[in-house]
Image (cartoon, rainbow, N blue to C red):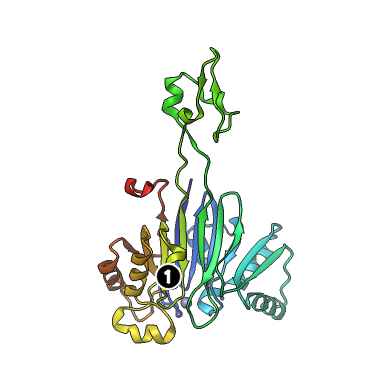
Amino acid sequence: MTFEFTPLGVGAAIPIAGRHTSAHILNIQDQIYLIDCGEGTQMQLGRYAFRRSRIKQIFISHLHGDHVLGLIGLLTSYSLLGRDVPMQVFGPTGIKAFIEANLTHTHSYIPYELNIHELDPTIHSRIFENQAIEVFSFPLLHRVPTCGYLFREKQRPPRINIAALERYDIPKAAIRGIKMEGDDFTTEDGEIIPNATLTLPPYPSRSFAYCSDTAYNEALVPIIKGVDLLYHEATYLNRHYKQAEFSMHSTAQDAATIAKLAAVQQLLIGHYSSRYLHVDLLREEAQYIFPNTALALEGEVYKVPLERKPERIQ
Ligand SMILES: [Zn+2]
């Protein structure tokens, strides 16, 4: 039951050696989703052994180059590789014109079904679902229309209580046909074992929020409240807050304050300005406010466990 996030690019607008522009893989229950697609994304996918063909949905936050300039290359690589399964691309107003103009002027032909979902970047709404998850977009506060994304697992069925099966000497195969949500089980001797005895509550649904790029914005707090993992940009240190305000980015202190207000489980900061060759100070600044902060590092895997800490299960 995988739930893990892998940054492929943790730099801000300008790539520097060892630090790429924004792109991230979110793996939920073995489905992988690409979030942003900056320059070099295909190379980073290869470096960290993500097969391009496994991606069926791409979520673009906004149309600044450091989040989208790898997209056309990826879409056209799929053509060259003979992709025949549909691709969905989600992004704010302008994404359709951006893709279509680039495909037109590069004389590219897309043989597979390409569905472009242009989102209203001013509203909070559900934009996608499949068997495992729901995805919501919500407004971020940036210089151009920008969408944040919230990924939430759907409620899973109750779990089989293995200890109870052993207690009543019921083989696991014998209960395959019963509904975990309600059916009781009748033994060969006619004894009825109540469903509540045979099952345990489902694992809690896990969630991930992506907030990049954005200025400090407390309007995010109710939307991302209590998520297991929050990726929030932290382009600057607080001592450069004027640059942050001017460019509508966040400082590490801003990111940590939002994480604290939203009572998230863990904060991951990234989108580091190229002015910082070392980013430990960004982590220290954030940890002063929100201790459970980690630095996003390219190729690292950040896992959300199946069960939260006991005090959070209630
Ligand atoms: Zn950016």
Judged left or right of residue 259, residue 224 is: right
Q: Position of residue 206 (x, y in %)?
A: 46, 52
Q: Amino acid at mark 1?
A: Val
**Mark 1, secondary structure of its residue:** loop
Q: From what the image shows, is residue 131 above or below residue 218?
A: above
Q: Please report the residue visible at 52 percent of the width from the left and 20 percent of the height from the top.
A: 192
Question: Residue farthest to the top?
Answer: 189
Q: Please report the residue visible at 53 percent of the width from the left and 69 percent of the height from the top.
A: 138
Q: Please report the residue visible at 51 percent of the width from the left and 29 percent of the height from the top.
A: 195
Instruction: Classify mark 1 as within 8 Å of ligand 1 or not, answering yes or no.
Output: no
Judged left or right of residue 185, residue 206 is: left
Q: Position of residue 230 (x, y in %)?
A: 41, 63
Q: Nearer the viewer, residue 97 or 40?
A: 97
Q: From what the image shows, is residue 168 above or below residue 98?
A: above
List the residue tagged with mark 1: 10
Q: From what the image shows, is residue 113 above or below residue 199?
A: below
Q: Nearer the viewer, residue 280 or 285?
A: 285
Q: Position of residue 308 (x, y in %)?
A: 37, 48
Q: Does residue 238 appear anywhere in the picture?
A: yes
Can you tell which quarter of the image residue 240 is in?
Answer: bottom left
**Circle 1 crowding by C-alpha within 10 Å: few under 14, some 14–19, many from 20:** many
Judged left or right of residue 72, residue 289 is: left
Q: Position of residue 41 (x, y in %)?
A: 52, 68
